[in-house]
Structures are given as C-alpha cells and as structure tokens.
C-alpha cells in the first residue's frame, strides 16, 4: 500500500503534537508557591491528593510539600547522571523517578502491599497514594504524626531504618530541606484555607 505524501505529513504532524501533549502532562504547574493557583490549574492533582488524604490520613498540604521537595511537581523527574572524569556517564545517582521520586525497590514494595501492580510513578494518582502509604508506614514504624511534615520528610528521604538511627543528623543540608518542607506545608495549608479549597 502506497501512502500519499500529504497523508504522511499529516500523520507525522499529529504524532508530534500528540508527543507534545503527553510531555506537558509531566510539566510543573506555573506557580509552585501558590496552592490556590495550582489547584485551579491542576484540579486532577488535588483530586488525587484528596483521595490519598481520605485513604491514608496525610493532609493535602503535607503531600504537596513533599512532592515539591522531591520533584517540583515534574511527573517524569529523575536524578542527575553521575560522571567519571567529567565526561564518562556512570548512570543515574539512584533509581528515583516521578512525582514522588520513589526508588525502584520501595515502589515495588508499595505495589505488592497495596495490590496496585499497574501503579506508575509518573501518574499523580499513584504518586500521591504512594506518599500516603509511605507516611502511614512512618506512623507505624517510627511513631511520626501525619501532621509532622518535617519528620515525615526525613523518614521519607532516609528510609524508616535510617530515620530510626537518626542518620539525618549527619546531613545538615537535609535538615534544612526538611525544615523548608515543614514551612511549605504550613504555607500551603494557610493558602488553601484562605481560598476555601478545604
């Protein structure tokens, strides 16, 4: 079968446009410092976070602050490449991927425990559910309150065992990030209350 050159051009343009559309799904919202603007721009994000809040008990502002710290709301975020001698690529720093920056092994544990085998780290619904699941584990294993954004983030970053060993104490930069997560969670909470998104 011979395809007309004009038909082929149209198909190529449609494929390019479809690719552009798919890519935009992974882009960050325009204003990451305004929870109300984000909720208007990305209502799907907020539906996902509300569902995770209902299922796991972790508030929308805390989820938002963790996602902001991990990926800046970029759905296909990855860790940077490591380089040897500045020119030889040595692979990525870790297997962290997606909104939640979940590692391969932790994501597989989440999938097995929740029975959500089709979950994807670049789907906001699955990423927020993962954050809720992981935070609930932090409550069970380390006694962290679901409202304690700072310590939830430290456990999220260091793992439950690392948090229990207080490995973060040797990482002042991480403590600073956790403090910013806590402050951002408070900011998002105040903003969402002011624009009546709760």
Image: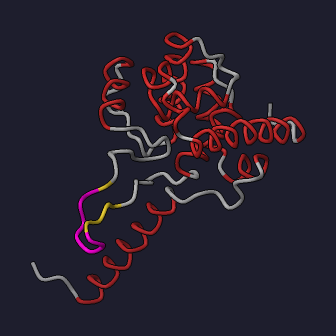
Name, please, the residue furthest toward the left: 1
Name, please, the residue furthest toward the right: 194
Q: In this picture, is 16 found above or below 177?
A: below
Name, please, the residue furthest toward the bottom: 5
For this rendering, which residue is in front, 138 or 39?
Answer: 138
On-image quarter of the N terminus: bottom left
Q: Which residues are magenta?
A: 85-91
Q: Is residue 99 left or right of residue 11?
A: right
Q: Residue at x 77, y 40 (%)?
A: 188
Q: Residue at x 52, y 25 (%)?
A: 166
For this rendering, which residue is in front, 127 or 46?
Answer: 127
The percent coordinates of residue 157 (x first, y second) are 49, 35
For this rendering, which residue is in front, 18 or 166?
Answer: 166
Q: In this picture, is 181 found above or below 30?
A: above
Q: In this picture, is 137 found above or below 6?
A: above
Magenta segment includes 186: no
For this rendering, which residue is in front, 19 or 144?
Answer: 144
Q: Is residue 115 left or right of residue 151?
A: left
């Amino acid at each position: 079968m011979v395809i007309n050159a004009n038909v082929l051009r149209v198909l190529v343009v449609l494929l390019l446009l479809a690719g552009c559309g798919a890519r935009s799904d992974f882009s960050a919202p325009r204003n990451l410092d305004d929870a109300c603007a984000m909720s208007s721009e990305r209502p799907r994000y907020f539906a996902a976070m509300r569902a995770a809040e209902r299922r796991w008990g972790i508030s929308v502002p805390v989820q938002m602050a963790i996602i902001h710290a991990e990926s800046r709301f970029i759905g296909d975020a990855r860790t940077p490449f490591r380089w040897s001698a500045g020119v030889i690529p040595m692979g990525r720093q870790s297997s962290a991927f997606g909104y939640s920056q979940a590692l391969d092994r932790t994501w597989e544990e989440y999938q097995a425990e929740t029975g959500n085998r089709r979950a994807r780290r670049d789907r906001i619904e699955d990423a927020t559910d993962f954050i809720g699941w992981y935070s609930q584990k932090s409550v069970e294993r380390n006694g962290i309150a679901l409202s304690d954004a700072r310590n939830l983030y430290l456990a999220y970053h260091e793992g439950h065992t690392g948090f229990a060993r207080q490995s973060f104490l040797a990482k002042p930069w991480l403590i600073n990030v956790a403090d910013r997560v806590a402050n951002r969670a408070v900011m998002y909470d105040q903003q969402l209350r002011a624009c009546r998104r709760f």
